[in-house]
Amino acid sequence: MTVISTQDLVRRFGDVVAVNGLTFDVERGEVFGFLGHNGAGKTTTVRLLNGVLSPTSGTMRLFDLDPVEDGPALRRRVGVLTESPSLDERLTARENLKIYAELYDVPAADVSARVDELLGQFDLSERADSRAGEFSKGMKQRLALARALIHRPELLFLDEPTSGLDPMIAHQVHELIAGYAAEGRTVFMCTHNLYEAQRLCDRVAVLEHGHLLAQGTPHELASRYARSQRLEIEATPATLPLALKTLNKMSGIEDVEAQNHSVISCSGATQETIPDIVALLVAGGVRIVRVTPLEASLEDVYFALHEHAAKGAQS
Amino acid sequence: MNLCGLNWRGIRAVMTKDLTVVLRSKMILLPMILLPVMLQVLMPAAFGIAAYFAGDAIAGDLEDLQVMIAWLPAEVQGRLAAQSPGQVFLEIMLVYAFAPMYLIIPMMVSSVVAADSFVGERERKTLEALLYTPLTDSELLLAKILTAWLAAVVVGVGSFLLYIVMVNLIGWLVVDGIAFPNLMWLVLVFWVSPAVAGLGLGVTVLLSTRVNTFQEAYQLGSMIVLPVVALMIGQFAGVLSLSVLLAIGLGAGVWLVDALIFWFGVKTFNRDALIARL
């Protein structure tokens, strides 16, 4: 079932085109990553999809509802974690959650139990009655995330969910997102954390200056767009210096590094050049034990796409 | 509750949130307490003390108030003629001269609460989460208007009750009593004051789309007290006198202006415009 569907979505602010012709679908139960640098149009897209901003042109449907016409009905089914926690700092953690439970029409009899459940889940029970203004950045982010989940939304928008969090808390947030998706709910995650996207997302879309550069699974994008692959070459320890010297001389091969006494990694290889690299090493006297092509990471794809877009813009 | 097809539970939640936030801010709470204390307690007390120590010598000051007395209804003038100079002085100052000044209280309270609720929320970056809730634009606007208006009406009525105690206490201690409250004050408190509260917050709502900080909104919104100051000067200068009829007419005029401002506010208040300024 398609949860989000957009067609040629455009939003202008005066002369600035923040979102330019976005077309994509998100299926139920997916974790969909929306990748792009700051100012790429990610937050504007989230605002459009929630009916908080109106599009200049194009169409969009969420749960088959029009966000502009059916905003209130749609927002009842959606939770949003904004880029800044957007918490009332003069209210306690409990009050912040309770007020949003009322706003999202959580049944009155369930409010207290739901608030306590989330405070416990996000490790905030002990500080439930402290004002949010006294919280650390990580605690505020956890509270904001708890607030986004207060009404058990079917679709969750996360705008930079682990920005500024320490690795431990970020890991907890990742677990939560994965668990949430496992329940059949849908997650739309804006991020520029490529590791996070690679780890969590079923599909990703890469955005630049409001344009969609590419979309697909991380694997599809890697095989389609990565300009080169990393290679791991294991040689006999005695011939390792020779392998290093030979690789460093090869054109197109970069980042040559000895991982240990027998393994070298390098980048810049392609499916076509790998046999030539192996042949040159063997011809040079290197005794190869193993050659492993490593799949390009989303990071490689991301930079390849941006480089490609920048070249396109220059020409 | 679905009265008028509105989400009253959500409206009440926003009001609870905004009022709690206001009550926890010293910067907002202090003027809400100090202004009534200054206008409704300290100033009448100062006049009471002045009248007490001046005794009959205060008759000289009454010459300056003749122009104001001349505008009062005939029955009031007749009653004042039979009173002591101190009693006349206090009744003129506390019952008639102070009347327009009272209006500053609801106006300032609604203005400061609205400034915090509309602009302060944006400044604290808490507005965005609120815009993602299921409330409609009209419900959100109504919640914020009701918060500021109710706060102003409650503080206004509370101040009036305090003033009743003060004026009667001063009357009892210093002279042979002062007839207070009169019908003109009741009209002022229950008809003009709620309208004036609406005016203060209405102007702030209009300003909220043009300013970026609470301080800016508060300072610009404070300019709305100028007509009240003009009303006071008019009374002292003998140009007009706040009577029951004038109060009813004034209230009707302000309610009309309120209606126009809110009509314009509803047309311009929308998520798109608000979030574009974040």
Image (cartoon, rainbow, N blue to C red):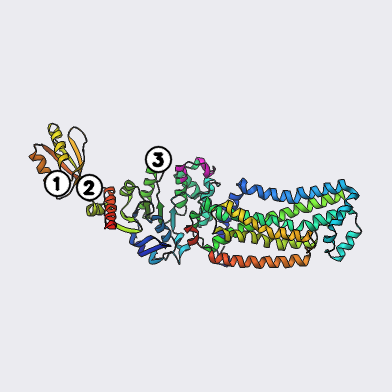
Where's the N terminus of chain A, which quadrant?
Answer: bottom left
Identify the subunit bearing mark 1: A
Is A304 located above or below residue B251 in the figure? above
Query: Which sits earlier in the primary sequence, circle 1 or circle 2?
Result: 1
Q: Position of residue A189 (x, y in %)?
A: 37, 53
- Distance of label 1 from label 3 (alpha carbons): 39 Å
- The answer to whether marks 1 and 3 mark residues whose Cβ atoms lie closer than 8 Å is no
Where's the C terminus of chain A, which quadrant?
Answer: bottom left
Residues in magenta, as a range:
A126-140
Where does label 1 land, which residue? Answer: A274
Left/right placement of residue B52 relative to residue A84 reads right
Identify the subunit bearing mark 2: A
- The answer to whether marks 1 and 2 mark residues whose Cβ atoms lie closer than 8 Å is no
SS at circle 3: loop
Residue displayed at 67% across by 66% down: B255
Amino acid type, callout 3: Asp
Number of the label disc, if any, that sits on residue A295:
2
On whether residue A132 falls in the magenta region, the answer is yes
Query: Which sits earlier in the primary sequence, circle 1 or circle 3?
Result: 3
Number of the label disc, if any, that sits on residue A166:
3
- Distance of label 1 from label 2 (alpha carbons): 13 Å
